[in-house]
């Protein structure tokens, strides 16, 4: 298989993975997982930064952010 064909295949796989990660059902599942939830005992500064990140993500849906990657 030529390197150009491999690169094209890899790009398609990456696009499909991004699409799946950004699906509504997958986002709901990921948000419910404990690994994706912040610890209650975080320092105040880190908690504020995470809150700002959450606010920014709500302004720009994850689906749009993943497409730019």
Image (cartoon, rainbow, N blue to C red):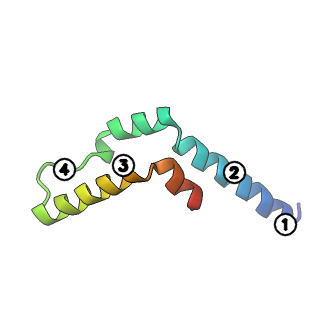
Q: Which of marks 3 and 4 is nearer the N terminus?
A: 4
Mark 3 vs 4: CB contact within 8 A = no
Horizontal and vertical percent for residue 9? Answer: 78, 55
Q: Which of 51 and 20 is in front in this view?
A: 51
Q: Mark 1 points at which residue?
A: 4
Crowd class of label 1 (few under 14; some 14 to 19; many from 20; radius 10 Å): few
Q: Earlier in the sequence, mark 1 or mark 4?
A: 1
4 or 2: tag closer to the N-terminus: 2
Mark 2 surroundings within 10 Å by alpha-carbon count, few (fewer than 14), some (14 through 19), many (20 or more): few
Q: Which of 42 and 51 is in front in this view?
A: 51
Mark toward the viewer: 2 or 3: 3
**Element carrying mark 2:** helix
Q: Is residue 3 above or below residue 62?
A: below
Q: Crowding near pointer 3: few (<14 within 10 Å), some, many (20+)?
A: few
Residue displayed at 11% across by 61% down: 44
Q: Where is residue 29 in the image (x, y as percent from the top left)?
A: 41, 34
Residue at mark 2:
13
Question: Between marks 1 and 4, how big is the CA–CA gap?
Answer: 45 Å
**Residue 58, numbered circle:** 3
Count numbered badges in the picture.
4
Q: Quadrant of the C terminus?
A: bottom right
Q: Which mark is residue 39?
A: 4
What kind of element bears circle 3? Answer: helix
């Amino acid at each position: 298989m030529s390197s150009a064909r491999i690169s094209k295949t890899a790009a398609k796989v990456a696009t499909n993975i991004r699409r799946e990660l950004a699906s509504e059902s997958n986002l709901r599942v990921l948000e419910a997982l404990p690994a994706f939830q912040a610890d209650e005992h975080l320092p105040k500064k880190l908690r504020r930064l995470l809150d700002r990140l959450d606010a920014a993500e709500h302004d720009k849906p994850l689906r749009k952010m993943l497409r730019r990657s």
